[in-house]
Amino acid sequence: MSIAHGQRVLAAGEPVASARAAMILLHGRGASAEDIMTIASEVQHPGWAYLAPQAVGNAWYPNPFTAPLASNEPYLSAALDMISKLVERVEPTVPAQRIMLLGFSQGACLTLEWAARNARRYGAIVGLSGGLIGPDDTPRDYPRSFDETPVFLGCSDVDPYIAKERVLDAAEVFKRMGAAVTVRLYPGMGHMVGAEETAIVRGLVEAI
């Protein structure tokens, strides 16, 4: 499968045309679609389609997620548009209420930012080691509601790339927008996906 500008999308599980649910997975900086798809293999469930787009140059945008928004353009807007196009490809057979969006690191930041800008009821939103994009003083006046969408945010409390305060800030924004938010900060874990996080994601999959 490919989407905007021929961007490659790695697919696993059920074909989208016959799937009952779908997970869109976004990899981190320097990683690949194959890397993030290892999470899909650990939470595989019958009837699910798993889709992982590949960023050009293995990065969705060039600068830290805390940099001024303009410094990550036009790459940020292109990446957000890519997610929109991928969701549009999935929705004819899988409604938003059965779509889970999941990202790790830079992919988590992109996932959370796209979801906040396109809020409605989804199957679930998962940000593993990520926060909303932009400096600390970025206005977070997103206009729509998540209508009780389950949101899971997990991160190390000493992650070298993601300050725990940015995870907690994102949680507050999503709560304000009507999401059912769960946050877990893991002492000393490092920049990785832990076993408990994987188990929580598996539970979200099974609930959809």
Image: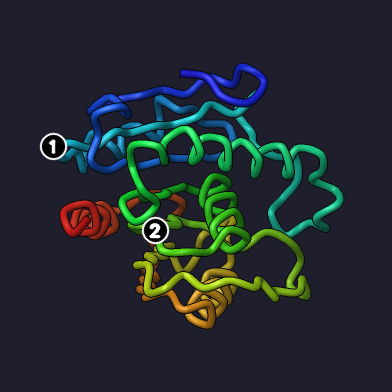
**x and y percent of residue 126 in the render?**
40, 57
Closest to the observer, 167 or 20: 20
Q: Tell me which corner region of the image, top left, top right, bottom left or bottom right, holds residue 155.
A: bottom left
Residue 170 left/right relative to 78: left
**x and y percent of residue 179 in the render?**
43, 74
**Secondary structure category for the residue under label 2:** loop
* Point 36% across, 48% down: residue: 95
Q: Tell me which corner region of the image, top left, top right, bottom left or bottom right, holds residue 58.
A: top right
Residue 79 left/right relative to 200: right
The answer to whether residue 92 is above or below residue 2 is below
**Secondary structure category for the residue under label 1:** loop
Mark 1 and mark 2 lie on one chain; the one further toward the N terminus is 1
Answer few, some or many: residues within 10 Å of disc 2's Cα (few below 14, many 20 plus, some between 14 and 19).
Answer: many
Closest to the observer, 163 or 43: 43
Residue type highlighted by circle 2: Tyr
Instruction: Name the residue at the right extreme.
Output: 70
The answer to whether residue 119 is above or below residue 192 is below
**Residue identified by numbered label 2:** 122
* Point 46% across, 78% down: residue: 178
**Residue identified by numbered label 1:** 46
